[in-house]
Image (tube, grey):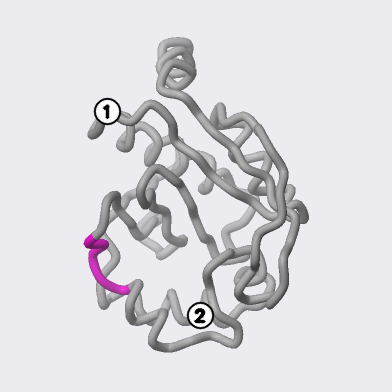
């Protein structure tokens, strides 16, 4: 297990999130992020989430390692390239998924990745999500529709995975 901690997004996250939002190779994989980086969008994300769900900062051994959240019933995460490939996204996704199912009565959690993001595809599959459809969605940063994979994880499947992990 990695030494990961989580807290609500806040003003202290501004510099790290600005750096993340300034990296084209990261932003191109996000559906709703502007390019070039929009300072107002970054500021909006650097405060506690007020909608249905949550958005957390991820810290690895005390260092900023990205963000993860569930809005509505859709999970998403964004990590700087400096921490890619370390298992942080997988562990954080498992943690956020458990929090989601433990704190509400929803039956399904969904996720989306662009077709050209195999790393996120692997994370979601490792966490028990199943790919159920592919479609085109508009990518704000890219400025055009991109093929995306839609995933879902049912409460029943999550409970089965959780029981097997014990």
SS under mark 2: helix
Q: Earlier in the sequence, mark 1 or mark 2?
A: 2
- Which mark, by number, is residue 19? 2
**Relative image position of residue 164 (x, y in whole percent):** 47, 11
Q: Quarter of the image for the C terminus: give it.
A: top left
What x and y, as percent, mark residue 7?
Answer: 26, 56
Q: Residue at x 39, y 42 (%)?
A: 73
Give SS at disc 1: loop
Who is closer to the viewer here, 67 or 104?
104
103 relative to 73, above or below: above
Vertical position of residue 103 compared to residue 15: above or below: above
How far is mark 1 from mark 2, CA to CA? 36 Å
Which residue is at 66% across, 59% downward?
A: 137
Magenta range is: 46-50
Report the disc number at residue 105: 1
Residue 93 placement, left or right of 146:
left
């Amino acid at each position: 297990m990695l030494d990961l901690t989580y807290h609500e997004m806040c003003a202290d996250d501004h510099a790290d999130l600005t750096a993340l939002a300034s990296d084209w190779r990261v932003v191109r994989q996000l559906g709703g992020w502007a390019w070039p980086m929009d300072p107002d969008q970054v500021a909006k994300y650097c405060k506690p989430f007020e909608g249905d769900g949550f958005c957390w900062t991820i810290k690895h051994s005390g260092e900023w390692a990205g963000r993860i959240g569930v809005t509505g019933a859709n999970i998403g995460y964004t990590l700087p390239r400096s921490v890619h490939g370390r298992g942080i996204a997988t562990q954080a996704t498992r943690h956020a998924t458990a929090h989601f199912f433990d704190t509400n009565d929803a039956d399904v959690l969904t996720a989306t990745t662009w077709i050209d993001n195999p790393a996120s595809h692997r994370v979601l599959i490792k966490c028990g999500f199943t790919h159920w459809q592919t479609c085109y969605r508009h990518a704000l940063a890219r400025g055009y529709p991109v093929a995306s994979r839609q995933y879902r994880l049912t409460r029943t499947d999550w409970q089965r995975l959780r029981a097997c992990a014990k």
